Image (cartoon, helix red, strand yellow):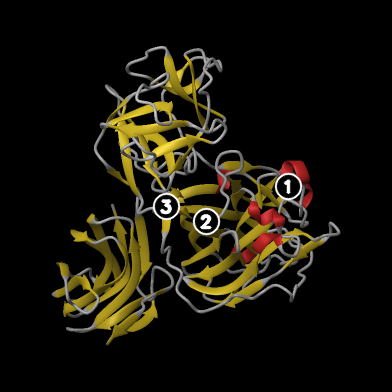
Amino acid sequence: MRRVVRSLFLFFAFLCTSTLGFAQGWNLVWQDEFNGSIGPDWVFETGNAGGWGNNELEYYRRENATVENGALVITAKREDFGGFRYTSTRMKTQGKKSWKYGRIEARISVPLGSGLWPAFWMLGSNIGDVGWPASGEIDIMEHINSESTIYGTPHWAAADGSHASYGGSTNTTPQNYHVYSVEWDANAIKWFVDGVQYHALDITNGTGSTEEFHKDFFILLNMAVGGNWPGFNIDESKLPAKMLVDYVRVYQKGDDTGTYNSWALDGTSKVIRHQNSRARVDKATNVTPYQDGNWKLVTGLAGAGVSFQSQNFPDRYLHQRNGELWLDASDGTQAFKETATFYKRSGLSNSAANSFEAYNLPGSYIRQKDSLLYVKKAGTSTAKKAATFKMGASLQGAFSATIEAESYADMSGIQTEACSEGGQDVGWIDANDWIVWNVTLPSAGTYKVEYRVASQTGGGKLQLEKAGGTQVYGALDVPSTGGWQTWNTVSHNVTLPAGAQQIAVKALAGGWNLNWLKISQ
């Protein structure tokens, strides 16, 4: 969002290809679907703050953010407030949620109009300590005025401390819904629109002073009115103007299938779970992890933050301190030498299952044996300060993937067209037409598959199958929705295999359009 100059550093590899980047190998770790309300992990910035470094003309207010029809709405208004002529909203997850690496995406529709500047972006969590641009900035999506161009730009501090950036852009229909995302790991940041990559930055080993991009970042959403980049010619006839955000999601990669092994604490609804070579604790009824990468404990204990009590040693507690797991006394003091945080390592001799080794006390482990969870030393049969939990049923991760119909890998007989809900849909579907998509599923099991369909006449029927038709997963009737661009959602539950695969929808009877499908557990 902060745009001062746009410097192109040609020594960076432009890794751009036209490959489809649909969250393959990624595990969903955080999301806000804006279903009825704005989630608790957003902080609202208010005021003008000297134009936010860009000479912006608006006054940011919490009141300009609402939820309508399952989407976040950020409204820029012609409204005199706080000494300014315009109001809008700027919101962030700073201090609530931040991530190092991942796939960060949102489905967004932006308004067109001179002077409007909507953005979906990220800032380094250490900005309060080091300032900008040393904190780093990842602009996932920016749009100005009435252009058809979308911009993706990283900003950082060059070796001499000056501002560096490396901007990319692509043309689309910004007023329609599109999925804007970056895929960010230790080697590169890549920018996508609807799964198609258009820009990339090489950050391997901090090349070109890009060390900033190997630290935690938080998310921001805002819509500025005026500023150095869009200019100061505001078309007030376009106000109020609405930026729509269907969802924001964060995925991170793991080195297992995404299945949780869980240990239930007796008499509670809380579970300790293993996923992606880390351990987590949350409510059994909420399979979305509260915090990635560490343990998150959810029971209360005075003086010790949130904690779990040992069932067989009532004065022993596993509790959270600064986002990590500690084995302590009931008052939260560091009374035991086993006090530690635990990261997963491969199974040990005599451990009979997975174990978690203390990174600061090597040789201390959290370990599963005989359907119980222990804290103990390596190779011992007697638990040291044992905190034992009864093993519970295996839980599945909160997997959810929405596939835009037009993002297919292969097809026969269909055509794409403009969609009344934004973007494109696939239509002109006749009997025996088919569409194939690439997906990766975390585990074998039952999935709910939803289809966003429209049909003037009804009488259609679709079949979900493995690409090529060698295996049929289920079939579903497509009713009349009242028009070719009048959309309804139909769904069924099917059993699907794990891993990377190609799924297909085949028309057993035609006469319907498809906007998207969603696969979830």
* Residue 387 numbered tag: none
Residue identifier under label 1: 48
Residue shown at the point (48%, 40%) measured from the top left: 291
Residue 433 picture location, percent across and down:
22, 83
Q: Amino acid at mark 1?
A: Asn
Residue 205 picture location, percent across and down:
67, 60
Q: Earlier in the sequence, mark 2 or mark 1?
A: 1
Q: Find numbered disc 1 in the image and state the secondary structure of the residue it sits on.
A: loop
Residue identifier under label 3: 28
Q: Nearer the viewer, mark 3 or mark 1?
A: 3
- Vertical arrangement, residue 340 with respect to residue 81, above or below: above
Q: Nearer the viewer, mark 2 or mark 1?
A: 2
Pointer 3 local density, CA inside 10 Å: few below 14, some 14–19, many at least 20: many
Residue 122 picture location, percent across and down:
62, 54
Among the 4 quarters of the image, the one containing residue 416 = bottom left
Q: Amino acid at mark 3?
A: Leu
Residue 17 picture location, percent across and down:
54, 78
> From mark 2 to mark 1, how far is it between C-alphas?
31 Å
Q: Find numbered disc 2 in the image and state the secondary structure of the residue it sits on.
A: strand
Q: Amino acid at mark 2?
A: Gly
* The one of 98 and 72 positioned closer to us in this rendering: 98
* The one of 282 and 221 positioned closer to us in this rendering: 282
Residue identifier under label 2: 102
